[in-house]
Amino acid sequence: MNLSRCLRLGSVEETIDLSKLDPSFKYEIAGTPEGRTLFCCYQCGTCSSSCPLSEMFDIKPHLVIRMTQLGMREEVLSCKTIWLCATCFNCVERCPQKCELSSVMFAIKNLASKEKGVPPGLRALVQNIYNLGRSAEVSDFEEEDRANLKLPKTPGVDVEAIRRILDRTGMNRLLEGGAR
C-alpha cells in the first residue's frame, strides 16, 4: 500500500511520501532552546506575510514550520529559506501564537550545518571575518570616500581576538565544512 498525502506548498501541490517522513525531526528541533516554540504554530501565515524577504525564499516561513512539524527533514534541512532568514523578528513580533520563528530557524540551521554543511557564501563570509576581522576588506576607494566626507580612517580590528572568539565558539568549523 502506497501511503502518500498531498500538501499545498504555496501555489504548488506536492505529494508527500509518508514513508520518507522522519517523525522524530520535530522533537529534535522542538527539544532545543531555540526550537521550543515549534508547536505553537497553527499555520495562519502571518510570519510569511510579515517577512520582508518572503518573496526570495524557496519555501515560505510558515511552510518551513509545517514541514518541520510533519517530519520532512530532508526538504527542510536542504531549503534555502533557513539560510536567507534575516532574523528581523517581524514574524516573532506579529505571531498571534508567540511562535519564535527566527529562533526556530536557528535551531534548523544548526542541525543543517551539522548534517549538510553550510552554503559556500556563508563560509566565505566567515573566512573573511576570520582573516580580516570584518566581513569585507576596506578598500583604498572606501578610505578615500571617508576622507572626502571628513570621516576618520576605518578603525583597525584586533584580528587575533576575533579569531580566538571564533575558535572558542566553534564558528571556525564552518571553514572546514564541505560545499553544499
Image: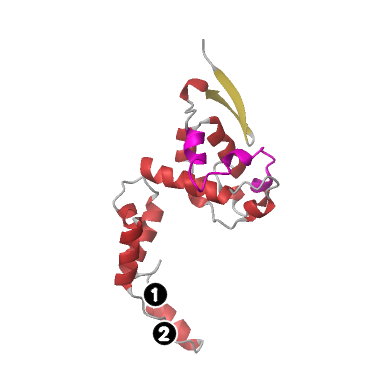
Q: Name the residue that disc number 2 marks.
A: 153
Q: Is residue 159 or residue 125 the one in the foreground?
A: 159
Q: Is residue 42 left or right of residue 175?
A: right
Q: In this view, does 121 lie to the left or right of 3?
A: left
Q: What residue type is labelled 1?
A: Val
The answer to which image quadrant residue 62 occupies is top right
Q: In this view, does 119 lie above or below 133?
A: above
Q: What residue type is labelled 2?
A: Lys
Are the residues flagged by discs 1 and 2 in contact, CB closer than 8 Å? no
The answer to which image quadrant residue 133 occupies is bottom left
Q: Which residue is drawn at 46% across and 24% down?
A: 20
Q: Which residue is drawn at 39% across and 48% down?
A: 118
Residues in magenta, as a range: 25-48
Which image quarter holds the C terminus?
top left
Task: Measuring from the top left, give residue 148's x and y in whole percent.
Answer: 48, 87
The number of discs equals 2
| Residue 63 on the magenta segment | no
Task: Measuring from the top left, give residue 24's x and y in whole percent.
Answer: 47, 30
Task: Measuring from the top left, give residue 23's x and y in whole percent.
Answer: 49, 28
Q: Is residue 126 left or right of residue 94?
A: left
Q: If you read the primary sequence from the N terminus, does the residue marked by circle 1 or circle 2 appear first?
A: 1
**Disc sitting over residue 138 in the figure:** 1
| Residue 31 on the magenta segment | yes
Q: Which residue is drawn at 38% across and 80% down?
A: 140
